[in-house]
Amino acid sequence: MTAEPSQAYDATADSQARMRPGRPLVPSATIAGRALVVVIAILTFLAALTASGAQLVANASREWRSSVAREVTIQVRPQPRMDVEGAVSKAAGLARSTKGVESVRVFSKGESERLLEPWLGGGLDLVELPVPRLIVVKLTGEAAASDLGALKDTLRRDVPGASLDDHRLWVERLATMAGGVILVGLVVLGLVIAAAALAIGFATRGALAGAKDIVEVLHFVGADDIFIAREFQSRFLRLGLKGGLIGGGAAAFFLTLAGWLAASLRASPGGNEVEALFGSFEIGWSGYGAIGAVVLLVAAVTALVSRETVRRQLRSMA
C-alpha cells in the first residue's frame, strides 16, 4: 500500500521546512543533545582526574627515587672489643674523601636508638643492645656507581662491621610500583574513552533516526553520504567540545582546590603524610596540559565516532 500523493507532498514539505537556511541538520538544543553534553562532561571529568592522578603518582615517584638515589647509608655494627666511635669516625672520613659526596651526617648513639622506637617502643634501656650506628651520605650528581663500589670495598676492608647500602632495591620497587599505578591509570582512561565512544554512537544513531526524513530529502536533491556525515560530525564535534570543556574545567578546578587545601593543611600531621605520598599535590602546567589533551581527545573521539556511525548507518539504509 503506497502513500497518497498529498501525504508524500506534506512529508516532503515538512522536511523542507525543517531544512530552512541557518537551521542545522542535527539540532543540538534538544533534550538528547543536552543529555549527551552532560554525559561527555562527566566522562571527561573522570578521564582528566585519572590522567592527572597518574601524573601526580609519576611526579611523586620521580621525587622519591631522586631523593633515595641521592643518599646512601653506611651502617657500622658494634663488635666485641671494638672502638665503635673510632670506627664511625673512620668510616665518615672515608666517605668524605669519596668523589661525588656532598655531605656526611653521623647519627649519634642516641639518635640511632631513637630510630628503633617505632618498632620497640619508647623508654627502653638499649645500653646492652648492639645498636648499629648510622652514617647518612648525601651525593651530588657527579657520584658514579664505580665510586660507590670502591667506597663499599674500602669500608669492608678497613672498617670492621661496616657496610654500605645504596638503596637500589628500594629504587627498583618504587619504579615498579609507580609503573603499575600509571598502567592502571592508562587502562582506566582507555575504558572511560571507550564508554564515551559507546554513548556517542548510540546518540548518533538516535539523531540519525530522528532526521531520517531530512536525510531522504538530501539524498533526493543529490547530497552524498560524505556531506551528510560531515554535517553530523560538525554538530557532534561542537557537543563534544562543549562537554569536554565543562568536564575538563571542573577537573582543573577540583585539582586546584585540592592543591590549595593540601598546601593549607601541610603543617598538620595528616598534611605531611599526604605530601609524603603525593608530593606537593600540584599538577603544574604539564598537568593542565594533560587535561587539555584529554578534552581534545574526547572531542576528536566524538567527531570520529559520529562520522563513522552515520556513514555505516547510511550504507545500511541504502
Image (tube, grey):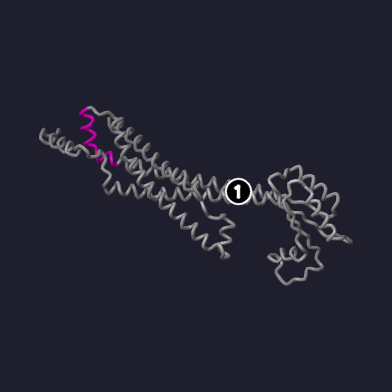
Residue 260: x and y, percent?
49, 59
Residue at image mark 1:
62
- The magenta stretch is 206-221
Quadrant of image for the N terminus = top left
Decide if residue 264 is on the left or right side of residue 223: right
Out of 36 and 251, give the one closest to the viewer.
Answer: 251
Q: Furthest-left residue in view? A: 6
What residue sits 20% from the left and 37% below the top?
Answer: 21
Residue 112: x and y, percent?
75, 63
What residue sits 33% from the left and 41% below the top?
Answer: 236
Disc 1 marks a residue whose amino acid type is Arg
Decide if residue 261 is on the left or right side of residue 167: left
User: In what element is the residue under mark 1?
Assistant: helix
Quadrant of image for the C terminus = top left
Query: What is the magenta segment's predominant secondary structure?
Result: helix
Residue 169 vs 80, above or below: the answer is above
Crowding at mark 1 (Cα within 10 Å: few <14, some 14-19, many 20+): some
Out of 106 and 274, give the one closest to the viewer.
Answer: 106
Out of 255 and 260, give the one closest to the viewer.
Answer: 260
Residue 257: x and y, percent?
46, 57
Residue 143 vs 1, above or below: the answer is below
What residue sits 12% from the left and 34% below the top?
Answer: 9
Q: Furthest-top residue in view? A: 222
Can you tell which quarter of the image residue 296 is in? top left
Decide if residue 274 is on the left or right side of residue 90: left
Q: Furthest-bottom residue in view? A: 123
Q: How many marks?
A: 1
Q: Is residue 131 magenta?
A: no
Residue 11: x and y, percent?
16, 37
